[in-house]
Each structure stands twice: as structure tokens, then as C-alpha cells.
Amino acid sequence: MSTNTSYLIRGAKPLGNEASDILVLDGKIAALGADAATHPGAAAATVIEAAGQIALPGLVDLHTHLREPGREDAETVETGTRAAALGGFTAVHAMANSNPVADTAGVVEQVWSLGKRSGWVDVRPVGAVTVGLAGTQMSEIGAMADSRAQVRVFSDDGICVFDPLLMRRALEYVKAFDGVVAQHAQEPRLTEGAQMNEGEVSAVLGLAGWPAVAEESIIARDVLLAEHVGSRLHICHVSTAGSVEIIRWAKSRGVNVTAEVTPHHLLLTDELVKSYDPVYKVNPPLRREADVMALRAGLADGTIDIIGTDHAPHPSEAKECEWAAAAMGMTGLETALSVVQHTMVETGMISWADFARITSTAPAAIGRVADQGRELAMGEPANITLVDAEARWIVDPFAMATKGRNSPFKGLELPGKVTSVFFHGHPTVLGGKLATPRVSGAF
Amino acid sequence: MKHLLSTLDLSRADAIRILDIAEEMAAVGTREVKKLPALRGRTVVNLFFEDSTRTRISFEAAAKRLSADVINFSAKGSSVSKGESLKDTAQTLQAIGADAVVIRHGASGAPARLAATDWIDAPVVNAGDGTHEHPTQALLDAFTLRTHWSALHGHTSLGSDLSGMRVAIVGDILHSRVARSNLWLLRTLGAEVTMVAPPTLLPHGSNVWPCTISYDLDATLASGTDAVMMLRVQGERMHDSYFPNTREYSRLWGFDDARLAALDARDTGETIIMHPGPMNRGLEISSAAADSPRSTVLAQVANGVAVRMAVLYLLLSGDQQRPAPSDATRPAGL
């Protein structure tokens, strides 16, 4: 073993608990606490001083748009996964709305192998539910599940699987592969031409409204369908107070449903649209303050299971225009940790242990990523993110690794800096900067 | 005032200043030589991404009466139809040396984008953006209302507002930039506003607006109004299920002959009928109502030129150019 495969992380606080050294050896956690420094492998280890920092299991994003293949001007697997690593992630799920759509084994294997080649995080492709996201014919879900990409999450994200019969069939079919359908809940007729949340602000701005009921009615339908057929259902980017209530009700009935919220929906409201700056244009749209508070409460009480970034980079020309012409979406990989710390941890609503659950353990479980989201315990894969929770930084989209400059947090001061990330024992981030990618075997 | 983007952010003092200057501008329109030298050598660009001959010629007449050079840039046949962005168009106008940009755009907020970005430095006048606002229309409506209101009460209109006036705005509020701009300006000037429309044509969220909402035009007219502003309704809206058909719309929310007769039975012309044009005669307004002595439709058009002269004058030769002596609002050459 060469010296650079072992690392002794000194003084970090696992999940914010008492400080404990962590010895990383050959991709695994070899020892913790007092045993770490005395372990025979520690002698040659590179020491990482992390006194006072929080040690977390590497973050897992269930909802990332890497844009490749097809929109390499917006993002590539390489740039997107660099951003992910800097944001503290060790795995991301690449959404299927690429061009060509990830609706065949060929495309998901391409994305999977691009991820392997990049080596910054695990890239888990999401497979489309329907061919071309067209909502009419089921994709080859079995072929994608059995491919080298081992797809377990299926989603037409960006577009709702609206046909109730097709949705029912998809929910049933994925059971054969231990899969989950991740629904983009948006009633299409109620949101034709929709530009922003429908409410008091849209009434004044004269922008076509995206009503909460368009999300809530689909979620209500789908939790009942999931109950009826006994399938796993995941709801992408929940954005309204009513949706939280419906999911809470469904869980109380024992429906096998999980839900995600984005960092931006935990912090920003539709008041920002008054600027008509398309950096705030996103789907689902920014909602009211009451929705933000309900989402935070739902995340704290476990109704909402996970954070999903919905990282959606766009080239600048897609935002340097009038609101109606602008693309929907915001970047999020490099700000997610800080926004969640700011909105949930610093408000006292969750602990760092909860943070690890909603950003790592639970998303890994939903996506069936076996070697991610694990405990920080001996023998576990060394996917570890170190955070300086005391640090404060000003968001600068031009200093980010993503190609997208469309961060709605631009100029905000946020807490929490990712200092180091270990990806299967390999440091992808050191001193808050990208280190080197992990070289893995054949792809 | 650097731009005129909306009436929501227009102060009472600025609104009255515009109306007062417009009165002096209106006087110019009655002269044999309808021209002032105020903006000689300045270039005003009418940047119209949407067809609107009426608004464009009104702005053009206003700029020309102030001796400005006018460039009309219409999206049809321009590079916009070839896919040029708003940004590139704005930067092109900047390079050409536009001193003011009057913009009409189908997208709500497009003028605000021009004003907020560094694409162009010139003052921006919103000539109607999507379903957001049309501030000069609201100003010319307020000018028309103020003329009527002050005459009715025998006081001078200069410096006055619309306190106590009751205005009903009737029709497709949901899609109307005119309704929104009028609501904010009328409230700023002290008038009471009632919005009358089928519930489908009222925006979700308008329940918190500072106005009364009514679904019943007859009840609103019976309760007494000083002005009724009829909005244009597009017949195509019935295809989107906003109302069953144009006949039912007309019966319930159109200013038809029966409603005109009812009004005539109640007063002797104190209540005026307004319409921003272009009218759908027989749909939201009957010909008899449009052509009645109560109708201010043509006065509104004439006042539009005066109000737009005042706005261009204020933006191009007002605060930016001169320190403000007491009569700084008085146009040079009057």
C-alpha cells in the first residue's frame, strides 16, 4: 500500500457528536476514536487536521441534472460531478431528461461510464419511465435495471407521468426490479403556460400561475395508486404546504411513499419574482412563505424524507432574457449543504444526525445505493464529508465548478464550508478545493 | 424618475406632476403649430415586439411634438423574428445612441428587465408588457377622469387628484395590463375602484387587491359609479372555457343598450363610459354606448399623446438634466 491510500482524520465530530479520529484505509473506515491513531495502518497515513469540523457520510443526491449527453454546453458529467464533490456529495443520480433521453440501456450505460471515468462521485443514472419522456409508452425499464448502470430510480422528471393508467402500470412494473418511480407531480392542463406560483404575487405581476393544486392533485392520485398496487413511490421536489399534508396522511395509512424537497424551496419565496430576474424561475416554482415553513416542518418531522438538489444548470443565454422566454431551473450542488444548514440546522429544527439521514442515508436507501449513506463505523466504505460549520461564505456563481451560473443564492452569505470529501477512501476534495478524481477499474 | 415601468411604484407626487405637465402639453396639441423644441436632437426608439399601431403612433406623435427623432423598431421583419434576443436588441439600440426606449412586449416584465440590466442605459418607458402593466394608458385614463371630475365639481384640475371618485373596471381583468395599471394609479390618486368580471377572468390572488370585486355589472351600476371603464374581451377566450360564448358574455358583462338606457334614466351624463380601444362593438360595448355623449373614447386617445409627451419630457429633460428650481416641471418653451 502506498502512503496516499490511508488518511487519519483528526478531531472531527461524527454527526456533530464528540470528537473522534477516523482512520481511512484502502477505501474503508479502519478504525475510529482512540484506536485510530494506534492502528498499525495509521503510521503511514496522511494526517487531515479537522478539529471542530463535522464528519458526515458523503452526501447522496437523488435529483441531479448532468445534461450529458446532449446539452454539454450546460453541463457535462465531468463538470457536474466536480460541482457535486465540492458540495460534499459522493453520489448523484443523473436525471433522464438528456438528449437522447435516458430511456434505453445504452444511454444509461453511457452516463454510468462517463461517471466512472470522471471519478469524482458515483453517478447513478435515472431511467425514463416512458420512451422519450413522451408519456405514452413504457421505456425498457427491465433492460436499464439489468444493465451495468443497475438503474433503480425511474423518472420522467421535468414532465409528469400524467396518464393514470400508465402511472399505475409503471408503479407495478418496477416492483420486479426493486425500483421506484420518482414522480414530477404537475397536472399538465392546470399548468399550461405556467410561469410562477399562482397567488397574490402572480396576480400583480401578470405572470401565468402554477397553482398548488396542480401538484397536490397528482400527489393525491399517486399515493392512492401506490397504495392500491403496493409499490414504492417517490415524489420529486415537493413545494407546497398542501403536498406535505397529503404525504403525511399517506404515510399514516402506510403507503410506501417517500418525498424530497429542494434547498431552494426551503429558503426562497415567490416574492423574489417581483424582480422578473429569471434566475428565480424554476419548476415547481418558488412558493409562499407559508409553504416554505410547512416544507421545513415536514422535513423536520420526517414527512419529507430527503433533500434533492434538482441541480439544473443552464447556459447564461437561457437566463439573460425576458422571464417568459427563460429556462426553468437553478444550480444547487455547491450550495445545498449550506442552505440546509442555514434553514434547518441553525434554526434548531434538525440535528447533524438528521442532516446525515436526509442528505445521505435516506436518499441512498431510496436509490438502492448499497455502499453509500452508511454509518460512520468500522468496516464501512469511507464516503466521508468534512464540514467547517462555523465558516461563512458569500455565494459567487462564477467561482463554482458547475458550468451553470444560475444560482439564486448569488451574493448571499451562507454558513458551512465543505473542507474535505473522501470518496471510497479517496480524497476528491482537500482544503475546500478539488483534489484528484478516484481512478477505478474498467468501465 | 429614471424609468416608467409601472404605476404600482409611481408616487402620488410623480403621478400628479405627470398629469399637470400633460395639461400643458395638451394645450400644445390645440395650437396651429403642434411642436415644442424640448427634445431636439434626442432619439426616442419605439421598440414594439407586439403589434399595437394605436400605442405606437401615440408615442410617435408625442415624441415628434417634442422635436425628438423617432425610430420605430417593430419585431415584424426585424432580427427579432430571426431569433435575436432582447439583450442583443437592447445593446444594438444602445450602440445606435437611443436616448429613450419605449417598449411594448408580450412578456410581462420585459421592460423591467431592460431597466434592471446593463444592456442599455437609456430610460425605459413601458408601453404595455404582457398581462402586467400599461402605465401610460392608466395615466391617460387618469387624465381623462381628472378633467371630468374637476369640471363636474367646478375646481381646477391642476394639482388635484381623484379623491372620492368611484370607478368601475369591467371585463377581462385577468389578462388586462390596463386594469392592473389603472387599479394602482386610481388608488394612489384617491379613487375607489370596483372590478367587475366573471370569476374566471379575475386573477387568483386578486381578492387582496385594494378594490371591491363584483360579478354583477347591473348591481355595480345601480350602486352608483362616476366612470365605467370597459375592457376589451377577446372572443377566443371562450375556447379556453373562460365563458360559454360571446352572447352570454355580452348579456352579463357587456355595456349594452339596456344598461345605457338604465344609466340615462338615472343621471344626466355625470357617469362617463371609457374604453382603452380597440373596441369590440357589440361584445363588451354596444355602438350606442361607444358613440354616446358619455363616451370618452376619443378624448382618451387625444389625452394619450399629451400624457406621453409629459412622460418623455420628464424622463429625457427633467431631473437628470437640470437642478430643480420651483418651476422645474414647467417645460421649456411653453
Image (tube, rainbow, N blue to C red):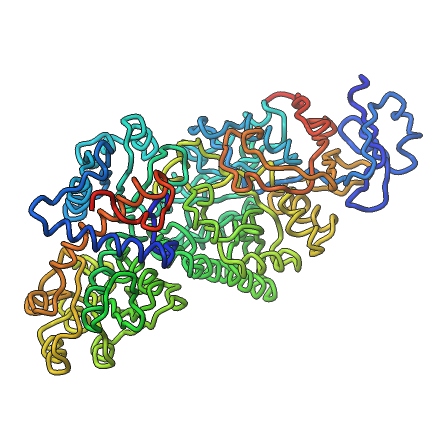
User: Where in the figure is residue B47, as x and y percent of width and height?
Assistant: 24, 38
Residue A52 appears in the rendering:
yes
Residue at 29% x, 31% y is B89
Viewer-nearest residue: A212 or A326:
A326
User: Where in the figure is residue B170, as x and y percent of width and height?
Assistant: 23, 67
The N terminus of chain A is located in which quarter?
top right
Please tell me whether residue A223 is drawn above or below residue B103 in the rendered image. below
Residue at 57% x, 50% y is A267
User: Where in the figure is residue B88, as x and y percent of width and height?
Assistant: 32, 29
User: Where in the figure is residue B94, as x and y percent of width and height?
Assistant: 32, 29
Residue at 69% x, 56% y is A349
Going by the picture, which residue comes out furthest to the top? A2
Residue at 59% x, 66% y is A253
Q: Which of the 4 image quadrants contains residue A25?
A: top right
Please tell me whether residue A275 is drawn above or below residue B91 in the rendered image. below
Viewer-nearest residue: A63 or A381:
A63
Q: Which of the 4 image quadrants contains residue B96?
A: top left
Residue A208 appears in the rendering:
no
